[in-house]
Image (cartoon, rainbow, N blue to C red):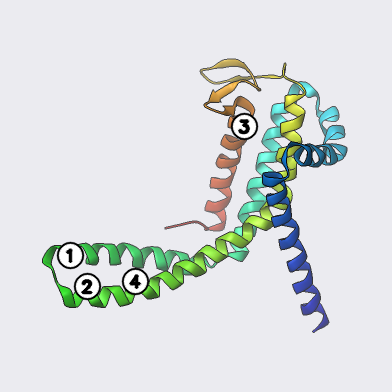
């Protein structure tokens, strides 16, 4: 009983901390984000010094991999993937039947499908809640690392990396719209690792 109570308290603390971090970065502005980045720098700056500043892109790759693995594991054990797959399948069938009922003006079937829609909305609400909770856990690791990378790279604007087809590029210049090259590299790395991990863990949509 004590261990279960402690587990719930830790869970509440982590959720509160994760959401506070998310909202703090969004609402408290530049100073808060810089403070988070500087605090993480206490751990990350020595690691970068060991690897070498010229290999900052490797640090970004490792960070992206850590974030992808951590996020995938969190989602694996906090989301009911069977419910998600079943709900997605039911939604596909529902949409097909609803279109057919509309085209044939079948009022009886439309009424029946409206009742079914309410049940499916309840399942979708459960899915939304399950997806919302992992965001707080994931932000505890991913946001501080991202803030450190953001403030480090903006203080080292001469950092470069060689990209396929693009050649050598400054990491602080724009790759697509507002996304700088370092952010593009970070998310591409994270996406690649994430796909492998999610495939191995058998998680994700249908």
Task: Give me the disc on residue 32.
Answer: none
Residue for badge 2:
110
Q: CA distance from mark 1 to mark 4?
A: 15 Å
Q: Which mark is residue 117?
A: 4
Q: Which residue is mark 3?
A: 183
Q: Is residue 105 left or right of residue 44?
A: left
Q: CA distance from mark 2 to mark 4?
A: 10 Å
Q: Is residue 82 visible?
A: no
Where residue 17 sits, quadrant-wise, is bottom right
Q: Secondary structure at mark 2?
A: helix
Residue visible at 57% across and 57% down? 201
Between discs 1 and 2, the one toward the N terminus: 1
Above or below — where is 199 with respect to 115?
A: above
The N terminus is located in which quarter? Answer: bottom right
Camera-near label (3 vs 4) is 4
Q: Secondary structure at mark 1?
A: helix
Crowd tier of the residue under label 2, counting other residues whose Cα lies within 10 Å: few below 14, some 14–19, many 20 or above: some
> How far, Cα to Cα, is label 1 from label 2?
7 Å
Residue 144: % across, % down: 75, 44
Residue 31 at what x, y percent from top left?
78, 38
Is the residue under label 2 in contact with that under label 1 (CB below 8 Å)? yes
Q: Earlier in the sequence, mark 2 or mark 4?
A: 2
Q: Residue at x 73, y 55 (%)?
A: 20
Q: Which residue is mark 1?
A: 102
The answer for how far apart the CA atoms under marks 2 and 3 are is: 47 Å
Q: Is residue 42 left or right of residue 171?
A: right
């Amino acid at each position: 009983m004590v261990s279960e109570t402690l587990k719930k308290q830790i869970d509440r603390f982590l959720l509160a901390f994760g959401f506070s971090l998310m909202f703090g970065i969004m609402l408290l502005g530049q100073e808060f984000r810089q403070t988070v980045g500087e605090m993480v720098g206490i751990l990350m700056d020595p690691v970068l010094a060991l690897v070498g500043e010229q290999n900052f892109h490797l640090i970004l790759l490792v960070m992206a991999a850590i974030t992808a693995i951590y996020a995938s594991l969190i989602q694996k054990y906090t989301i009911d993937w069977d419910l998600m797959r079943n709900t997605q399948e039911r939604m596909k069938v529902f949409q097909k039947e609803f279109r057919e009922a509309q085209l044939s003006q079948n009022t009886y079937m439309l009424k029946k499908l409206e009742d079914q829609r309410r049940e499916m909305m309840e399942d979708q609400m459960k899915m939304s809640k399950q997806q919302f909770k992992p965001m707080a856990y994931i932000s505890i690791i991913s946001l501080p690392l991202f803030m450190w990378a953001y403030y480090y790279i903006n203080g080292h604007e001469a950092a470069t990396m060689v990209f396929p087809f693009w050649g050598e590029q400054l990491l602080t210049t724009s790759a697509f719209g507002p996304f700088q090259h370092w952010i593009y590299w970070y998310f591409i790395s994270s996406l690649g690792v994430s796909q492998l991990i999610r495939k191995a863990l058998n998680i994700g949509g249908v």
